[in-house]
Image: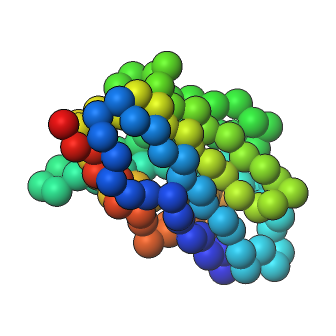
Amino acid sequence: QVRLAESGGGLVQDGGSLRLSCAASGLTFIPFSRYAMGWYRQAPGQQRESVANITRGGTPEYADSVKGRFTISRDNGKNTVYLQMNSLKPEDTAKYYCNAAFPGRNAWGQGTQVTVSS
């Protein structure tokens, strides 16, 4: 059972930057490189939404709201996926979750809080 641990959240001012990390463990049968990875976020009172995804081959995809500001990347040697967030806005405030997807398997981390002050 893959386990995910997010880190890197915090409080930042409008226009600032943060880098989130998500480290995977428990990769007994399926290597990290075989998982599609994604970042999602959920603000209070709102549904969880996709922020960015990266395929096994390294192709990224972004929500329109973060295109040009956020960059997703993965390091298969470190079993880690990253989310570089630049030009942060107050509307980016949310709890950010990491997801690992493989046919028949889907895992979530506990989340890390990102708060952007105006």
Q: Mark yes or no: residue 104 visible.
A: no
Quadrant of residue 55 within the rendered picture: top right
What percent of the width, then of the height, locates residue 47? Answer: 23, 51
Residue 34, horizontal then vertical, whole percent: 79, 54
Residue 70's place in the image compared with 94, above or below, is above
For the view shown, which residue lies furthest in the top direction?
A: 68
Q: In the figure, 5 relative to 66: above or below?
A: below
Q: Nearer the viewer, residue 83 or 4?
A: 83
- Nearer to me, 63 or 94: 94
Quadrant for the N terminus in the image: bottom right
Q: Residue furthest left?
A: 45
Residue sitting at 39 percent across and 22 percent down? 64
**Residue positioned 54% across, 47% down in the render:** 19
Question: Does residue 32 sit above or below 87 in this rendering?
Answer: below
Q: Position of residue 54 (x, y in %)?
A: 64, 39
Q: Position of residue 4 (x, y in %)?
A: 59, 70
Tag count: 0
Q: Is residue 101 left or right of residue 65?
A: right
Residue 20 visible somewhere in the drawing: yes
- Closer to us: 68 or 41: 68
Q: Which residue is at 29% across, 34% downward?
A: 14
Q: Residue at x 48, y 45 (%)?
A: 18
Q: Quadrant of the C terminus?
A: top left
- Side of 115 relative to 78 (left or right): left
